Image (tube, rainbow, N blue to C red):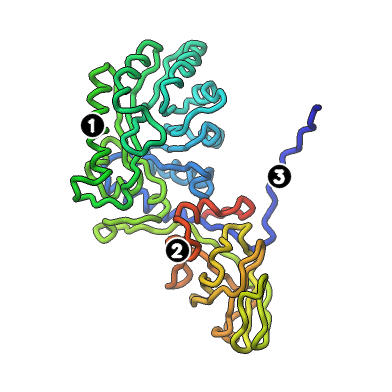
Amino acid sequence: MQIASVPEARERPAIRPTRVEVSVASLLANARAIREVAGVPVFAVVKADAYGHGAPGVVRALADAGAVAGFGVSLVEEGVQLREAGVTAPVLVMGPALRGGHDELVARELTAVVSDAGELEALAEVGRRRGRPVEVHLKVDTGMSRLGIALGDVAPVVARARGTGVEIVGLMTHFANADVDDPAAPDSLTAAQLDAFAAAERAARAAGAPLRVRHAANSSGAMAFPRARLDLVRVGLALYGNGHWPVDDTLEAPRRQAMRLVTEIVQLRPVAAGATVGYGALWRAPRDSRLAVLPVGYADGLPRRVTGKAEVLIGGQRCPLVGAVSMDIAVADVTALGDRVHVGDEVVLLGAQGSATITVAELARWAQLTEYEVTCGMSKRVPRVYR
């Protein structure tokens, strides 16, 4: 049965005031700070729609400013999106090219990360058909036990690559524990992974790999482990101003959270003492109260699990959310603000307002999530606005 194609939807101006605001200045300041700490080129990890910040906008800002040396994605499709947005900088596709994505990968001049020897022949075949060599980075499993070539297989894989015409110009690994390991501890998992990676490099070079670049450090590795910085660092969470920056106090430009989740009050409602609010009647007004209705909910990225814990900023003051967070609506208790609050006032669920800030880490604690899940969980129905 033939299925009719659906016309591409046009982007329409937002009517609802709920939006994700991304600070370009913060992104650039974070990139400069990371480069200052690492002392080597920075690749910006923009997979998963730039961790929810909107990959096209983030990449355009970083590329226009020349703030990074290249970009890292997980999927071939994500790399294609960057090329179609006009990005000419190196793009590293760190996940496997599934279901015949190798041709698209080579055609778009994306750099493949090989984590399974079986990919070599697929890439070599594409290279032969297109009449050009294919350069790849080889991923070595040093302790993550997820993707990557086993240490003992590095030399055979390099030899196999040479036989196919694929050139292994890069060597990489990924840390499992750098966000919690002590950089000074010689027996940490990260230290063991670096030792294993050094052995992998020796094996690869001895087998004839034309290595030009080695990289291991993610955000935490780049910020905390000098030995891990090698020839470049791959940063995601830190670029967006999140995660733990152990060197914050030594930086001229300390980290700046790039994301704000913002909406406006659409209704103000008086409720009598004893009235309940929302599904499940989870909150009962302890006194005559004034409530602000907010057009944002868990379908937008405000997790339902923050119910009973989260606060928002209104007029620079913290106000509790009350009742269950629903799909499209949340409710804030603004009784303490008196007549200083009005319909149309800005409400910040994530980010700064005046001198107050709700951080990604704080929202993550309320929701019992990681910081990654908070930003990646921002819904596609919420427009991204770049300031």
Q: Earlier in the sequence, mark 1 or mark 2?
A: 1
The residue labelled by disc 3 is 10
In the rendered structure, the answer to whether residue 243 lies left or right of residue 369 reads left
Quadrant where the image shows the N terminus: top right
Gap between marks 2 and 3 measured at Cα: 37 Å
**Which one is earlier in the sequence, the residue at label 3 or at label 1?**
3
Nearest the viewer among 285 and 280 is 280
Q: In the displayed structure, does residue 19 sit left or right of residue 126?
A: right
Badge 2: residue crowd in 10 Å (few <14, some 14–19, many ≥20): some
Residue lying at 54% horizontally and 53% vertically, measured from the top left: 377
| Residue depicted at x 38% and y 30% | 148
**Looking at the image, is 143 positioned above or below residue 179?**
above
Please name the residue that numbered disc 2 is placed on.
365
Judged from the image, the secondary structure of the residue bearing numbered disc 1 is helix
Measure the alpha-carbon separation of dots 3 and 1: 51 Å
CB atoms at circles 1 and 2 under 8 Å apart? no
Where's residue 223, x and y in %? 29, 49
Q: What amino acid is labelled 2 in the image?
A: Arg
The answer to the question of whether label 3 and label 1 lie on touching residues, with beta carbons closer than 8 A, is: no
Q: Amino acid at mark 1?
A: Ala
Element at badge 3?
A: loop
Judge depth for marks 2 and 3 and give the one in front: 2
Hey, what amino acid is under mark 3? Arg
Q: Where residue 333 appears, x then y in whole percent?
A: 58, 79
Snapshot quadrant of residue 17 = bottom right
The residue wearing badge 1 is 198
Q: Residue at x 65, y 86 (%)?
A: 274
- Structural crowding at the residue carrying mark 3, measured as other residues with C-alpha within 10 Å and reported as few (<14), some (14–19) or many (≥20): few
Residue 147, x across and y down, in percent: 41, 33
Q: Earlier in the sequence, mark 2 or mark 3?
A: 3
Q: Camera-side residue: 4 or 202?
A: 202
Locate residue 211, reporting x and y percent: 29, 24
